[in-house]
Image (cartoon, helix red, strand yellow):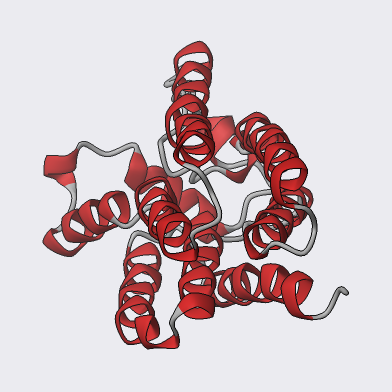
Amino acid sequence: MEHPPANHQYLTEENLATFEREGIAITRKKFSQLTRGQKLAQVISLVLAPNVVCPFVFIWFSITYHTTPFWLWTLGAIYFYGLHPLVLLIIFILTKRGDIYLTDRRQRFWPMVSAILGYIIFLSFIWVSFGWGNLLTRIISGSTLLSVGMLVVSLRWKISIHATGNSVGIMGLAVLNPMTMWVTLPLHALVIWVRRKVKAHTVTQLLVGTALGIGIPLSIFYVIP
């Protein structure tokens, strides 16, 4: 009698929707085995991932807004975009499964805990240096709250990290200059397309991620006194 693959139960657990299993299957394929559209989508997913987009936006925001000294945004960049991805890589090595896109939402807990701790540490520096009224303080506060919400939601539902994370960047740049949306919104639409192409998310999950990524930080800035 032929035995099922070792990862059979992992891929077909009842708490995973069909599209989630399909998305995981795509990430397990070799790049050469993907269709042309899937290859393009994977490359764009990597190039326009939050860990690539957000540091660029953060540095641009910090320099333009003229409030964050060099050492402060460098410290944040080292953790957010250096140490946190390293934590993610260590988790992959120890568990021997997963991918850089966290396609399986069950693998999101510890990487997201790492990201939230980083936000809290960085937020403390921002808050002490500039206070609550500072624009950057409020945006980082919103990002921290958003990350906590994503962690809770991911326990039951697969919200898009690409859509949510990049939307924070879109919102931050739009606050400084609304004209940036002529560039950021088309790029974001491209991200939504590629994440759907590789069956990483449903359209609903991508749109909800976008709404939360823009709405929560923006609400904290404009609504809370």
Kindly indicate the quadrant of the structure image that contains residue 5: top left
In this view, 146 is above or below 1: below
x and y percentages locating residue 28 in the rendered image: 34, 37
Q: Residue at x 65, y 61 (%)?
A: 139
x and y percentages locating residue 143 in the rendered image: 66, 56
Indicate left or right for 48 with 204 as reference. left
x and y percentages locating residue 114 in the rendered image: 64, 30
User: Is the N terminus in the top left, top right, bottom left or bottom right quadrant?
Assistant: top left
Q: Residue at x 50, y 49 (%)?
A: 21
Q: Residue at x 38, y 59 (%)?
A: 60
Count of picture labels: 0
In this view, 158 is above or below 29: below
Kindly indicate the quadrant of the structure image that contains residue 35: bottom left
Indicate left or right for 152 with 207 as reference. right
The answer to whether residue 57 shows anywhere in this view is yes
User: Is the C terminus in the top left, top right, bottom left or bottom right quadrant?
Assistant: bottom right
Q: Residue at x 26, y 52 (%)?
A: 47
Task: Between residue 1 and residue 39, name the one nearer to us.
Answer: 39
Indicate left or right for 44 with 193 as reference. left
Task: Between residue 97 and residue 125, name the one nearer to us.
Answer: 125
What residue occupies the far right of the structure in this picture?
225
The answer to whether residue 203 shows anywhere in this view is no
What residue occupies the far top of the structure in this picture?
94
Indicate left or right for 81 with 175 as reference. left
